[in-house]
Image (cartoon, rainbow, N blue to C red):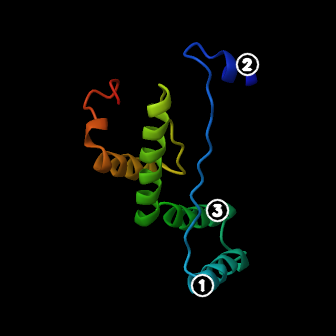
Amino acid sequence: MFRFYTKCPRGPYIPTSRIAKLDLDEDEKPRIDAEIEELTEDQEQDATEKSKSKWSRIEALAGSEKRIKLIAKDIVEHLEARLDAMTGKAMAVCMSRRICVDLYNAIVELRPDWHSDPYCKGY
């Protein structure tokens, strides 16, 4: 993996980690803990269904509109600052397809000229 980072045909690849914390209201934390506890207490529920339910609740928190807009703003500002100093590209990894689509739409809302109908053109 290190060789890929340093000997990439397009130049060195330098990953930059950007983390957006979940913004939970303090009043909501006990309710969420209680719901998760309730999910784990139910022995009748299939483990797969339990995991899906838990995952969908976490996905809803991670993909909240407020958080998506915050991340989109951070990506745009970060990429523009990087492009002022050097050429390059960006890649975002999301928790789900829905979050990816919402993030893309939020970025395009900030920078409409970054969208192109031919999917292979890009920014």
Measured as percent of width and height from the top left, residue 108 is found at: 31, 45
**Residue type at mark 3?**
Ser
Neighbourhood count class around disc 3 (C-alpha, 10 Å): few under 14, some 14–19, many 20 upward: few
Kindly report which numbered mark, 1 or 3, lies closer to the viewer in this rendering.
1
Q: What residue type is labelled 2?
A: Arg
Q: Mark 1 — residue?
A: 31
Say what secondary structure mark 2 lies in: helix
Residue 15 left/right relative to 87: right
Q: Which of 55 and 79 is in front in this view?
A: 79
In this image, 69 relative to 2: left or right? left
As measured in the structure, the alpha-carbon distance from the residue carrying label 2 to the one carrying label 1 is: 47 Å
Considering the image in quadrants, where does the N terminus appear? Answer: top right
Q: Which of 55 and 46 is in front in this view?
A: 55
The number of numbered discs placed on residues in the rendered structure image is 3
Labelled pair 2, 1 in contact (Cβ < 8 Å): no
Q: Which residue lies furthest to the front in this view?
A: 85
- Tell me: residue 84, above or below residue 97: above
Mark 3 secondary-structure assignment: helix
Residue in the image at 65% along x and 59% along y:
48
Camera-near label (3 vs 2) is: 2
Residue displayed at 61% across by 66% down: 54
Which residue does the numbered mark 3 point to in the structure image? Answer: 51
Amino acid type of the residue tagged 1 in the rendering: Arg
Residue designated by label 2? 3
| Residue 119 percent across, percent down from the top left | 32, 29
Q: Which of marks 2 and 1 is in front?
A: 2
Query: Which quadrant holds the C terminus?
Result: top left
Q: From the top left corner, tell me how far across and down residue 18 is, in percent.
A: 59, 48
